[in-house]
Each structure stands twice: as structure tokens, then as C-alpha cells.
Image (tube, helix red, strand yellow):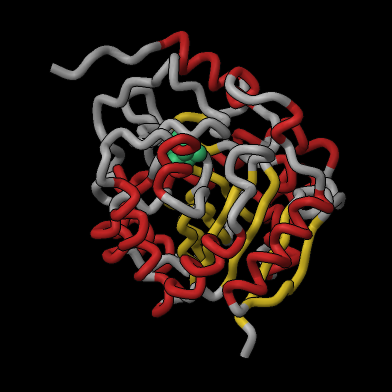
Amino acid sequence: MPSAPCEPAREALSRQGYLFYDRRSTAAVKPCLWCRRALGGGETCYKQQFYGIESYRCVQMTPTLRCNQRCLFCWRSFEHGVEEEVEPDPAALLAALPRLQKQALAGYKVHVPAERFEEASLPRHVAVSLAGEPTLYSQLPRFLELCTDAGMTTFLVTNGTRPWVVSDCRPFQTYVSLDAPDEATYRRVCRPESPDMWSLVRESLDLLGSRRSAIRTTLVAGLNDHDPAGYGALIADSSPTYVEVKGYMHLGYSRKRLAAAHMPPHERVRAFAEQVARHAGYRVRDENRASRVVVLEQVE
Ligand code: SF4
């Protein structure tokens, strides 16, 4: 029997800006800081700077909040899970995105030109990257396909533990997280729910060379910011289009597990990224100080 929705957790997330698709699934939308800033004509997300994705027309969402890891740096709560009774239908979920985005941005309506607000309510880009592991949603390949058919670009961010799903998905850009240079660090930092997951992440990494892709590393000071040669070797084997080395941000529920001192300063992120690049045969393509992120690309 499915358990009843855990309303306090759902309501806590709602107060944090999550808009749920309905009360029985855990699909949700939450506009990120940069979307809201860009809507008002302010700063944009590094994805606009790096990849040309218009921040104010980007919807950050997840089809599920379930996850099979308990990463120390995760923003979400592991203690207060939101129960999922049913999965959303992919076509209905896609159709709901403009409504949810409009609702989420409603407070900004009076501050921006009507035309810009209307554009923001019709997102052109879907970032499947809010929280939870999206490959646990059984209809993810179909959902991404429908987004593409609707003329939207898609970014899929996955922890890589379900390579058979990653293999079936065709987003515009596939991100696989690589948050450790070796299995022992992976287990300590990402705390996977089963012991075979490191090899599954490696399988997902193997898929990246044949598609537009990125490896995303969240660097946590003192926990996984060692062995740049180890990261470099894994990246060289996998051959993604890009690598993003991003500093951990002391936000959300991660503050209960980590200290502010675990946030590496941008200079540290940049220096580490340069070392990784050297070992992987990549070079620095760009960086964004506000987001503490450095993007690498392959040397031709
Ligand atoms: S894989 Fe993502 S959602 Fe899951 S615990 Fe790690 S950071 Fe959080």
C-alpha cells in the first residue's frame, strides 16, 4: 500500500519555493535565483554565459524527489522525505510547466514588462536538475523526448547510478555527477544506497563521449578536493564535451551536515580545475566567480 503524503515535509518545501505538480507525485518546479534575477534584467546564470541558455526562460524542475544517494552536500532533507504515491504522466507534466513557472514567478509580475513576464511563463529550456535523482522516474526518456518535440532544449543532471536509463535518454546536454576521484571517497561523500553504485556511475560516464555532455564535480573543501590526477584519468576515459568544477555552496539542509568552511573559495576551485584539466587533456573555457564554477573543454 502506498503511504500517505508526508504533509509537513511537502509544506516545508512549498515554503522554500517548490511548486508541486500535484499532491500525489513529487514532481516539482522551483525557479532558481538566476532565473528570478534575469527576469528583472539583472545577472544571469552561468549556463547563459557558458552555453547561451536564457536564464529567464529556463524552468528548473524534477519529475521526482526520490534519490538513491545521500550526498553530504545535497540541499535536500534526508530526514523528512516527501512520499510519492504515483508518478506523473509525462505529457501532462510537460503541459503543466508554463502554469507552474508562471505561478512561481507571479510575485515578480509587477516589477517587469508584461511582455517579458509572458515570455518567462513560456519556458524554452528545461533543466531537470532541482533535487532528487530524475532517472528514478520511469518515464524520463519519454518526458525528455516530448520536451524536445515541443521545441525546448533540455539539460539532464543525473548522479549516474542508473546507466541503462541514461542510455535511453536523449536530452540536449547530459550531465553526470562525478564527485570523487575513487570509490572510497565516493562512498564517503555521496553515501550511495547500494555497494555497486560506483561501477554504475563509471558505466554512465562511459556513455558521455558519444553525445553532448558534461561531467559535474561539486568540490567540497577537505572531502573530495584531492587527487586531481584521479579525476583527470576518469574524465579522459569518459571524454565528455565539458567538465564543470563547481564549489560547494553552504545552503539548504546541507548546512546540517557540513560547515561553511567546506565551501572552497573561487580561487581554490579555479586552481583545482586547472590541475584536473592538465591531467585530463582539457583546458579552461570559462569561469563564473559568483557561482564558483569553472568550465573545461577538450583540447582539440
Ligand atoms: S544525487 Fe543529487 S539529489 Fe541525490 S543526494 Fe546527491 S545531490 Fe542530493
Quadrant location of the C terminus?
A: bottom right
Q: Please report the residue visible at 77 percent of the width from the left and 36 percent of the height from the top.
A: 108
Horizontal side of 65 relative to 84 (left or right) equals right
Please state which of residues 223 and 200 is positioned toward the viewer in this rendering: 223
| Quarter holding residue 168 | bottom left
Is residue 151 in view from this perspective?
no
Q: Position of residue 161 (x, y in %)?
A: 33, 49
Please state which of residues 93 and 16 is positioned toward the viewer in this rendering: 16
In the picture shown, does residue 208 fall above or below 98? below
| Quarter holding residue 144 | bottom left
Q: Position of residue 229 (x, y in %)?
A: 58, 64
Quadrant location of the N terminus?
A: top left
Q: Please report the residue visible at 50 percent of the width from the left and 69 percent of the height from the top.
A: 233
| Quarter holding residue 141 | bottom left
Horizontal side of 185 relative to 44 (left or right) equals left
**Residue extending farthest top:** 8
Q: Please report the residue visible at 36 percent of the width from the left and 37 percent of the height from the top.
A: 192
Image label count: 0
Q: Please report the residue visible at 71 percent of the width from the left and 53 percent of the height from the top.
A: 56
Is residue 17 in view from this perspective?
yes
Please state which of residues 163 and 101 is positioned toward the viewer in this rendering: 163
Q: Position of residue 70 (x, y in %)?
A: 43, 31
Please state which of residues 299 and 1 is positioned toward the viewer in this rendering: 299
**Residue extending farthest bottom:** 300
Q: Position of residue 146 (x, y in %)?
A: 36, 61
